[in-house]
Image: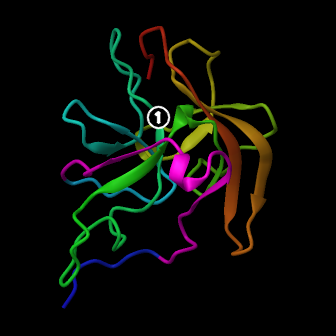
Amino acid sequence: MGTLVPAQMYDHTLVTIKGPPRLNRLDFSAAPAAAQTILQGALVSINAAGAIVEGCDVGVAANRPMPMWAIQATDDFDANSDVGNISGGVQSAVVATGGFEIETTEFVNAPTTYAPNDLLQPGLVADLGDVKLATVPPYGAETIVGCVSKAKATNRDGVTVLRFWTMFLPASLPATT
């Protein structure tokens, strides 16, 4: 009997609205770090060992983690092995500098209003894989990971989504949070 229970395919999503076709897109594949449960569409980065982790830390000195968005969840059958499945335990992610407009379910939803051109930053510990409205100017104490292209909306599955362009403006000051 299997041990994985994938989420419903519409609960957590990542849709690439615009950008290079799949064969030419900039993405990254690696195993998730131990004890990580990453949802599809979540903001991720890689740790010093090269494993995918949820969220995107500010980093230190000249080492700034690259923001990416998970293409599949940790418990999806194409990313993790289960009884009778030989997928290999590797996840893929869309890289923030790849010139994408994406739509995701993984953002801080309430009570925030998102407007076109609002900058986005990683969520805090409680919302680690989510993005949220930036609270500091670019190149400040937080990494900027996106720019809203369209106000949040409800997709065809009745789930609230946020559409934005991926970007990477690393923090230049020590983090305050």
- Residue 124 position, x and y percent, is 46, 37
Rendered position, 120 above or below 159: above
Secondary element at image label 1: loop
Residues packed near mark 1 inside 10 Å, few (<14), some (14 to 19) or many (20 plus) = many
Residue drawn where x is 55% and y is 54% of the image: 22
Query: Which residues lie in the magenta part?
Result: 8-34
- Residue 172 locus on image (x, y percent): 48, 9
Q: Which residue is mark 1?
A: 67
Q: Amino acid at mark 1?
A: Pro
Q: Residue at x 24, y 62 (%)?
A: 89
Q: Is residue 19 magenta?
A: yes
Residue at x 69% of width, y 75% of height: 157
The correct choice, above or below, for 18 with respect to 85 in the image is above
- Residue 119, visible in the rendered structure: yes
**For this view, does 65 lie left or right of residue 88?**
right
Residue 130 lies in the magenta-colored region? no
Q: What residue is at 55 percent from the left and 70 percent from the top?
A: 11
Residue 111 seen in the current view: no
Apparent side of residue 34 relative to residue 58 in the rendered image (left or right) = left
What is the x, y in percent for residue 167? 60, 30
85 vs 151, nearest the viewer? 85
Q: Locate residue 98: give its quadrant.
A: top right
Q: Residue furthest bottom?
A: 1
